[in-house]
Each structure stands twice: as C-alpha cells, then as structure tokens.
Amino acid sequence: MVEQGKTYLVMGLLDHDSIAYAIGKTIQGLGGNVIYTVQNERMKKLFLDGRRSKLSDEERDGLNIRYCDITIDDEVKALFADIGPLSGVVHSIAFGNPKTCLGEEFHTDAIDDILLSHHISCVSLATVARYAHKNMTDGGSIVAMTFDASHTFPFYNWMGVQKAALEGLVRALARRHGRDNIRVNAVSAGPLSTMAATKIPGFTELSDIWNNSSPLSWDPVVDRQAVADSVAYMIGCYSKKITGQVIKVDGGASIVGGQLLPHEHPQT
Ligand SMILES: NC(=O)c1ccc[n+]([C@@H]2O[C@H](COP(=O)([O-])OP(=O)(O)OC[C@H]3O[C@@H](n4cnc5c(N)ncnc54)[C@H](O)[C@@H]3O)[C@@H](O)[C@H]2O)c1
C-alpha cells in the first residue's frame, strides 16, 4: 500500500471530477503526502477558486499544487528539480482534439492534432520518467491511466491509437527502469464522467456498452473510487513485483465476448 509519510506526485488535476483528484485524495487518506500538477497557473486558480470549486478553507490550505505543461520540457525538468524525493508518480493526462481525433469519422487530415495528442497522451510519460527517476533514488512506482487498447471502440478513434502506444511505452519504460527499482504500469479504467470524457462525442454510447458488458456492473460516477483504489495499490509497495502491466479496472467488460444476456446482469 501507500507508504505513510512518503511523497507522491499526481499529475493531471483539472477539476473535482478528475480521476487525478480521486487518486490524490485516496493516497492522502492512506497516509501519503500528495503534490498535484495542473497544466498552468490559470487552471490552478480555476481549481482553487472557480465557480465549480467545492473546497473548504482547510482543504485549500492543505493542497500542494504545482503547474506543469507536459509538452514543455523545461517545465517538466524544473518541476522535478524543485520537488525533492518521491515514492511514486501518477500520470493522469491525455488530450485529443474532439473535432479531429474523436467522433463518427476516423479519417482526418489533421496530422498536427494527431501529433499533439500523441505528445500529450503518450510521449509525455517518457518525459516524466526521464526526470522523475532521479527523484526516486530508493525505487518507486509510476502509474499511467489508459483505456482498453486491445479493442476498438466507436468515437474513440485516435485516442485509442494513443492509448495503444502508451501501453507499449509502459512496457518499454518498465524494462528501462527496472535497474532503478522503479516500476512502470498502467491502470485501464472503464468510462468515467470527467471533463475529458465529456469531450468524447458518443461518451453516453460508450458508457452504455460498458453497462451491457460488465459482469460486475459499471457506474461512470461511483466507480471512479474503485479506479483510484487500484491506482493506490499500484503506486504503493503491495504491488512491488508488478511492472510493465496494464491492470484492468473495468468491471470485467474487457473479458466478455459480445454483450451480457439478461440473466447475466448483476442483481440490483
Ligand atoms: N474518463 C474516462 O472515461 C477515462 C477512462 C480511462 C482512462 N482515462 C484517462 O485518465 C486520465 C485522466 O483523465 P480524466 O478522465 O480524469 O479527465 P480530466 O480532463 O479531468 O484530466 C485530463 C488532464 O490532462 C491534462 N492535460 C491535457 N493537456 C495537458 C498538457 N499539455 N500538460 C499538462 N496537462 C495536460 C488536463 O489539464 C487535465 O488535467 C487520462 O489519461 C484519460 O485518458 C479516462
């Protein structure tokens, strides 16, 4: 589990629905110290003081939030130079232009959008590992967030391609950082209602697919916590011999061929 008093960096905070926020709160609840990153200063202000912010004064005072645009190498470098020893890093960051990288039509000539999406959603994990390993001199764990890349889904298009690349990168980084006693894994979550998800045209249809194919059932709001719990397991020492893996926290949807028949649905 998460080690008491050790520090964990959780990258990818946007708002109170972000998976990063659920993960950070879970790690804190288990006794870890959490440093969050948001993309820039403006987003930090929005998270702390925006209309949708639900923070009490006490919570606000207890938060340690840095900003870091993952596409700017110098910002990533400066972040890790500034934060001291870490036991784990969560990469909970992705982007794909909904108009070109997602939607009903797969084909697009927006190559720059595809490349930006690849940089943010995949390559940035390598940037993070390149700097973060120097902060984890006693070993540690890096966890990235993915979405089932062994199947294709409607609307998810180029993000599905980025996630497949991310999962390959997780294995490459696990091999590279084994010598540093740093594990690198991904947690593959079912669809969750977050800001990134609202940008996916057809997210409701995607959620419906999950509802019809999860032996354990799947709730895009409630099951955020199940995902955060699994990330806490993967970032902590109870998973210390697991590396290079994609851990599916998806209600079992990924093992089902076709859809569940009526008698197979979980009893409510
Ligand atoms: N929501 C889902 O259904 C779902 C399912 C499986 C996996 N995931 C993955 O979980 C992760 C977190 O997504 P979320 O659903 O919590 O949504 P979110 O919108 O709350 O988080 C996405 C984060 O990526 C950040 N980001 C985008 N571009 C960036 C940049 N250039 N530099 C720094 N940060 C940048 C955003 O600011 C935001 O904080 C993503 O990798 C996403 O693909 C989400």
Image (cartoon, helix red, strand yellow):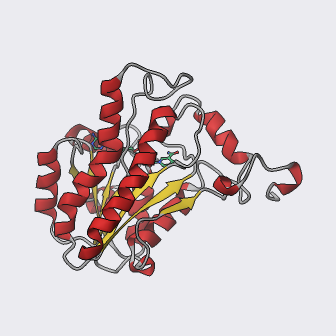
**Closest to the observer, 8 or 245:** 245
In the image, is residue 104 above or below residue 34?
A: above
Q: Quadrant of the C terminus?
A: bottom right
- Residue 71: give x, y in percent of width and height: 22, 41
Where residue 56 sits: x, y (%)?
37, 55
> Relative to 152, is 14 on the left or the right?
left
Residue 14 located left or right of residue 239? left
Q: Quadrant of ligand 1?
A: top left
Q: Quadrant of residue 132?
A: bottom left
Q: Is residue 141 something one can see in this rendering? A: yes
Residue 88 position in % (x across, y down): 31, 68
* Closer-to-camera residue (94/107): 107
Horizontally, is 262 left or right of 12 in the view? right
Answer above or below: position of 67 versus 226: above
Rendered position, 165 above or below 216 = above
Question: How many circles with numbers are drawn on the protein?
Answer: 0
Residue 31 coordinates in the image, percent (x, y): 37, 76
Q: Residue at x 46, y 51 (%)?
A: 146
Q: Is residue 65 visible?
A: no
Residue, far right: 263
Residue at screen point 11% across, 54% down: 78
Where residue 154 sits, quadrant-wise, is top right
Name which residue lies at 18% across and 72% down. Answer: 85
Q: Nearer the viewer, residue 196 or 57?
A: 196
- Please, which residue is most extreme toward the top here? 109
The residue that appears at 87% across and 49% down in the rendered structure is: 262
| Quarter of the N terminus within the rendering | bottom left
